[in-house]
Image: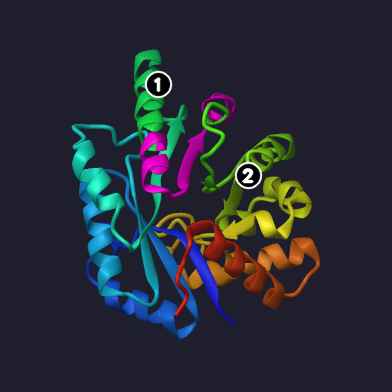
Amino acid sequence: MNLIDIHTHLNFPQFAEDREEVIKRAREVGVRMINVGTDLATSREVVALAEKCPSEMWATVGIHPTDIGDISWDELEHLAQNKKVVAIGECGLDYFHVKDVAERQQQAEVFEKQIDMAQRVGKPLMIHCRDAYDDLLAVLKNFPQVTGNVHFFAGDWPTAKKFLALGFTLSFTGAITFASNYDEVIKNLPLESLLIETDCPFVAPVPHRGQRNEPSYVVEVAKRVALLKGISLEEVARVTTATARLRFGLDLL
């Protein structure tokens, strides 16, 4: 059985001491992964790491809405053209951490610049959105040619349907193993529009809750999806892997 963890942060310092062992554990259980940049420095890191793991890892490059600083757009776009880069992001809007109106406007401007970049390089978006779904949807409606994935989706079913109408997939983390407020969306969402992730090192699923998360644990997310949908784990693995391949143009060797 093969799985794809579509949102990881293996370059983060929490993995500094045993990164190779973590990657090995993922490999041993058939998990491949997309490592996600959050600013220019981490975007460089995830590309370098993906290049060292050609058969099991890809990268995204982008500016997280709470990590806006001095941005070299030319360098970011240069990184985006690397063949190991499969999406732009994580990018989007975060109103949970940012309350200031001017800072929220800056988030929107940086988000739109990354949408423009995604169009130029022909790659999908890896979206981060927290407490800002309506405003983010309003932005996306101005860019009908762009699609992508909404990572760590935590909205309701009516909101999910709006993203589906724009051609986006939605991904879910280990939070679904211990919080029931995701159940309705997962039960209603077409399996072909659903992806799985860990967002490691954060949000470890049951039975690893409270520990550092890692890609090998994504199987627990897949198990919960299977349970909620009343289908086999193997079917979840097959369909989510195929969807990830199509969404991100993955070359599965």
| Residues rendered magenta in the picture | 115-139
- Which residue occupies the foreground of this view, 206 or 54? 54
The residue most toward the top is: 101
**Residue 214 visible (yes or no):** no
Picture residue at 78% right of the left edge, 62% below the top: 229
**Residue 39 drawn at (x, y percent):** 27, 43
The residue most toward the right is: 230
- Which residue occupies the foreground of this view, 162 or 159? 162
Name the disc covering residue 167, or none.
Answer: 2
How many residues crowd around disc 2 within 10 Å: few (fewer than 14), some, or many (20 or more)? some
Q: Identify the amino acid type marked 2.
A: Gly
In terms of image quadrants, where is residue 55?
A: bottom left
**Residue 131 drawn at (x, y percent):** 54, 30
- Which residue occupies the foreground of this view, 137 or 100? 137
Left or right, residue 2 beside residue 34: right
Q: Identify the amino acid type marked 1.
A: Arg
**Residue 10 drawn at (x, y percent):** 33, 63
Q: Is residue 112 above or below residue 5?
A: above
Name which of mark 1 and mark 2 comes first in the sequence: 1
How many residues crowd around disc 1 within 10 Å: few (fewer than 14), some, or many (20 or more)? some
Left or right, residue 227 beside residue 201: right
Q: Is residue 100 above or below residue 179?
A: above
Name the disc covering residue 104, or none.
Answer: 1
Q: Is residue 124 magenta?
A: yes
Picture residue at 47% right of the left edge, 42% below the top: 127
Dot 2: what SS? loop
Q: State how far apart marks 1 and 2 are (Cα).
A: 25 Å
**Residue 105 drawn at (x, y percent):** 39, 18
Quadrant holding the C terminus = bottom left
In terms of image quadrants, where is residue 57?
A: bottom left
**Residue 121 visible (yes or no):** yes
Picture residue at 47% right of the left edge, 48% below the top: 124
